[in-house]
Image: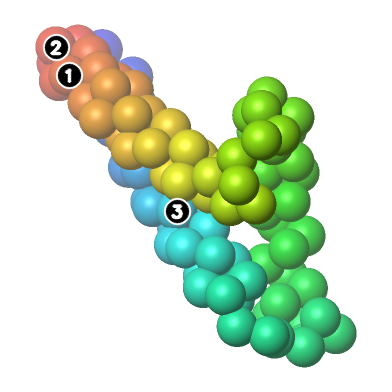
Amino acid sequence: MFILSNLLIALTRILDIGLSLYMWIIIARAVVSWVNADPYNQIVRFLVAVTEPVLSRIRGWLPLAMGGIDFSPMLLILAIIFLKSFLIRTLFQLAVSLR
């Protein structure tokens, strides 16, 4: 069972790093949206391409009368924090208990 435990620990760490990286990408996208960045810049295009599919789904759930402020990045960051707090810890504790 130690092989399954080690595999689960490795997958948990990769998932944790991936969620942290995606959270920083969302923060970078929010900062870029505050300034008047060139939409043809490769970095800006990458940030929009990576985050827009998820953010557009969240915007579909939010009411339209929000005063023109986009709360979708903040809600996505909160969801990532929840996943890191709940899912990552649960998977890690499961892996440790398999040893």
Of 89 and 38, which appears nearest the observer?
Answer: 38
Amino acid marked by disc 1: Gln
Q: Is residue 92 visible?
A: no
* Residue 38 horizontal side relative to residue 55, left or right: right
Answer few, some or many: residues within 10 Å of disc 3's Cα (few below 14, many 20 plus, some between 14 and 19): many
Ranked by sequence position, the earlier of labels 1 and 3 is 3
- Kindly identify which residue carries mark 1: 93
Asked if disc 2 and disc 3 are in contact, CB closer than 8 Å, the reply is no
Q: Count every numbered label the image shows and give the total.
A: 3
Q: Residue most toward the right?
A: 40
Amino acid marked by disc 2: Ser
Image position of 53 with respect to 49: above or below: above
Mark nearer the viewer, 2 or 1 = 1
- Kindly identify which residue carries mark 3: 23
* Residue 40 horizontal side relative to residue 12, left or right: right
Answer few, some or many: residues within 10 Å of disc 2's Cα (few below 14, many 20 plus, some between 14 and 19): few
Mark nearer the viewer, 2 or 3 = 3
- Kindly identify which residue carries mark 2: 97
Query: Whole-Å distance between the Cαs marked 1 and 3?
Result: 23 Å
Ranked by sequence position, the earlier of labels 2 and 3 is 3
Q: Quadrant of the C terminus?
A: top left
